[in-house]
Amino acid sequence: MKKIFFVLSLFLSLCACERKTLKDVTVKTSNGDVVYHLEIADTDEKRIKGLMYREHLASDSGMIFFFNDKHPQPIAMWMKNTYISLDMLFLSKQNTIIGIAENTTPMSLRIISPTKEYVAAVVELNAGQIKKHGIKKGDKVIY
């Protein structure tokens, strides 16, 4: 009985670790609002892994990376071990898009840093979302 309880406890703890916290995020564009269901990367471990090793991402999903909101900083991303092309939105502390990277190259080690301004968050979406919805610098992101 103890063995079964241990195995069940281990299984439940592993399931809890894999649970993804989601956040609905609205991008307010001149073409209208677009809602995405984003996984939250708010710890160093989650930010390091990001969307690595994913082979598919639903068109209305992605990931939001939160950085220290008291001290935003210049941020650089890369595509190491990322199998799918992404669009990236770099956000100011006021949730305004201040930098955009479109159609990033999968598996690339090239540094992606489209702004020298301080960044509070980065949103990663499927490549093509920026063009499809007319997302541009200056648009607001509500979360």
Image (cartoon, grey):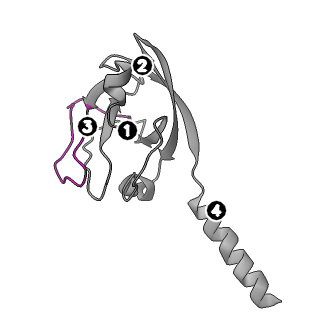
Nearest to N terminus: mark 3 or mark 1: 3
Residue under numbered circle 1: 126
Find the distance from the CA under tag 4 to the CA under tag 2: 33 Å
Q: Is residue 6 above or below residue 26?
A: below
Nearest to N terminus: mark 3 or mark 4: 4
In this picture, which residue range is highlighted in magenta?
101-125
Residue under numbered circle 2: 140
Q: Is residue 68 above or below residue 15?
A: above
Circles 2 and 3: CB distance less than 8 Å? no
Q: Is residue 30 magenta?
A: no
Q: Assess disc 1: are there few (<14), some (14-19) or many (≥20) residues with their C-alpha within 10 Å of its C-alpha.
A: many
Residue 143 seen in the current view = no
Q: Residue at x 48, y 42 (%)?
A: 58
Residue under numbered circle 4: 16
The rendered magenta stretch, by its main secondary structure, is classed as loop
Q: Assess disc 2: are there few (<14), some (14-19) or many (≥20) residues with their C-alpha within 10 Å of its C-alpha.
A: many
Mark 1, secondary structure of its residue = strand
Residue 59's disc number: none
Find the distance from the CA under tag 3 to the CA under tag 1: 8 Å
Circles 4 and 2: CB distance less than 8 Å? no
Q: Residue at x 32, y 36 (%)?
A: 127
Nearer mark to the viewer, of 1 and 2: 1
Q: Amino acid at mark 1?
A: Asn
Q: Is residue 53 above or below residue 101?
A: below
Residue at the extreme right: 1
Circles 3 and 1: CB distance less than 8 Å? no
